[in-house]
Amino acid sequence: MTGSASSFKHDWQYDPETGIIRVVPNGPISATDAGELMRLRHRDVPNGEAAFFMSDNRNVELTAEARKVLATEWEIGETYYAGWGAAFAQRSMLNLFMKALSLKYPIKANMFAEETAARAWLLEQRRAYLARKT
């Protein structure tokens, strides 16, 4: 399922088999985009289930307004996030932001150089999550 039917201007793919949401930003992520990201998560992931996100961070830019929305209005529950492709400084900034979010919300995040490593880590997190649920 993709996000093209909504107002979300970024590439959004949900794979129900793996439970992974893959986002590829197409320009800056605005406050509206951040809100739409939460809405799409609720559309695609069953209520009460953890969300497993991965995103291409080579060209990502979170506006100050988007950071505020994510920091104050996070409504997507337990979340696992794997990003890839960002330069060192950008990766450091994203790590810091995700660590700050994890102080308030149930988020586990990691950054990787390559998409394959990000996907492998996320799949392992999902396997462990599902094992804990049974």
Image: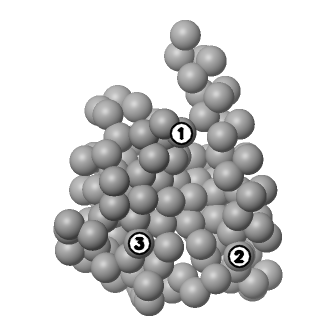
Residue 19, x across and y down, in percent: 48, 40
Whether residue 49 is situated above or below residue 26 in the rendered picture:
above
> Which residue is drawn at the image coordinates 31% and 46% (left, top)?
44
Whether residue 72 is situated above or below residue 129 in the rendered picture:
below
The residue pinned by badge 3 equals 11
Whether residue 1 is situated above or below residue 127 in the rendered picture:
below
Mark pair 3, 1: CA separation: 18 Å
Label 3: element kind? strand
Horizontal side of 61 relative to 73 (left or right) equals: right
Cβ atoms at labels 3 and 2 below 8 Å apart = no
Q: Amino acid at mark 2?
A: Gly
Label 1: element kind? loop
> Which residue is drawn at the image coordinates 69% and 69% (left, top)?
84
Mark pair 2, 1: CA separation: 21 Å
- The quadrant of the picture occupied by the C terminus is top right
The residue pinned by badge 2 equals 85
Residue count near mark 1 (Cα–Cα under 10 Å), binned few <14, some 14–19, many ≥20 = few
Q: Is residue 79 visible?
A: no
Residue 75, x across and y down, in percent: 32, 49
> Which residue is drawn at the image coordinates 70% and 79% (left, top)?
86
Whether residue 122 is situated above or below residue 26 in the rendered picture:
above
Label 2: element kind? loop
Q: Is residue 125 visible?
A: yes
How many numbered circles are shown?
3
- The quadrant of the picture occupied by the N terminus is bottom left
The residue pinned by badge 1 equals 18
> Which residue is drawn at the image coordinates 65% and 46% (left, top)?
122
Q: Quadrant of residue 30?
A: bottom left
Residue 7, x across and y down, in percent: 20, 74
Q: Amino acid at mark 3?
A: Asp
